[in-house]
Image (cartoon, grey):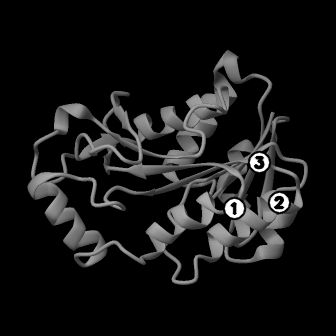
Amino acid sequence: MKLLILAAHGQIARLVEQRILTEPQFKDVELTLFLRNKSRMADLASNPRVTLIEGDINNREDVVAAAKGQDMIFSAVNDHDPQNRPTKNIIAAAKENGISRVIETSLLGLYNEVPGEFGRWNREYCFNGDPKGTPAVVVDELLENSGLDWTTLRLPWLNDRDEVKYTVTHRHEPFVGVSGSRKSIADVVLRIVADPTFGSKDSLGIADPATQGQDRPVY
């Protein structure tokens, strides 16, 4: 499999890359790593399973070119662009290159699915009280209508704990938890890489269930 990772220098992306390049189950996965300045990933430049590409996710031509010959696209940066250029470029790149499987990260609270005081606080902090029509919500709408095999990952408030511990909820289910580790998010991405049917055409909520009931993020 050939996997294109956009925003490849991000913290979650680096966790995904490290596991792919060191764990035997991913030995047949080749990585194309897309970022603005590839010198930031010089440590991987000599790896035979890695191709580094410089580009701008807001530039359609850059994303389309990077996706040539790939089997799956993972965008490791949330699309907050008012015109949703990253998501539109990803969809175009997938279609022009015959790629069906696309993964994007996003935010919790898109559907008012986060309960309690934390849900209220998160809605005010992230969406000024109402997620409807925001770029994060439009991402799901664009992907759902794209005809692609998509997954969005609704991330909790993140921490750098070492444990991989999370519950996955689906689009029309209440979100469980408030926070989770970046290692847990990376693990979900790798589950999809290992089994592309996991999370197919769904928006997955991810968080540590032990943080359920907290009214603020847990770091």
Residue 35: percent from left, percent from top: 68, 62
Q: Residue at x 60, y 67 (%)?
A: 142
Q: Which is nearer the eye, 193 or 10?
A: 193
Q: Residue at x 51, y 83 (%)?
A: 82
Residue 92: percent from left, percent from top: 78, 67
The disc label shown at residue 113, or none: none
With respect to residue 32, does 143 lie above or below?
Answer: below
Label 2 packing within 10 angstroms: few (<14), some (14-19), many (20+): some
Instruction: Tell which circle, 2 or 1, labels the residue nearer the N-terminal end.
Output: 2
Do the residues bearing badges 2 and 1 touch, measured as CB atoms within 8 Å? yes
Q: Amino acid at mark 1?
A: Ser
The disc label shown at residue 95, or none: 2
Q: CA distance from mark 2 to mark 3?
A: 7 Å
Q: Which residue is mark 1?
A: 146
Q: Amino acid at mark 2?
A: Lys
Residue 127: percent from left, percent from top: 30, 74
Q: Is residue 85 shown to the viewer in this render? A: yes
Q: Which residue is mark 3?
A: 100
Q: Which is nearer the eye, 137 or 82?
A: 137
Q: CA distance from mark 1 to mark 3?
A: 10 Å
Q: CA distance from mark 2 to mark 1?
A: 9 Å
Q: Which of the 4 quarters of the picture holds residue 53?
A: bottom right
Q: Amino acid at mark 3?
A: Ser
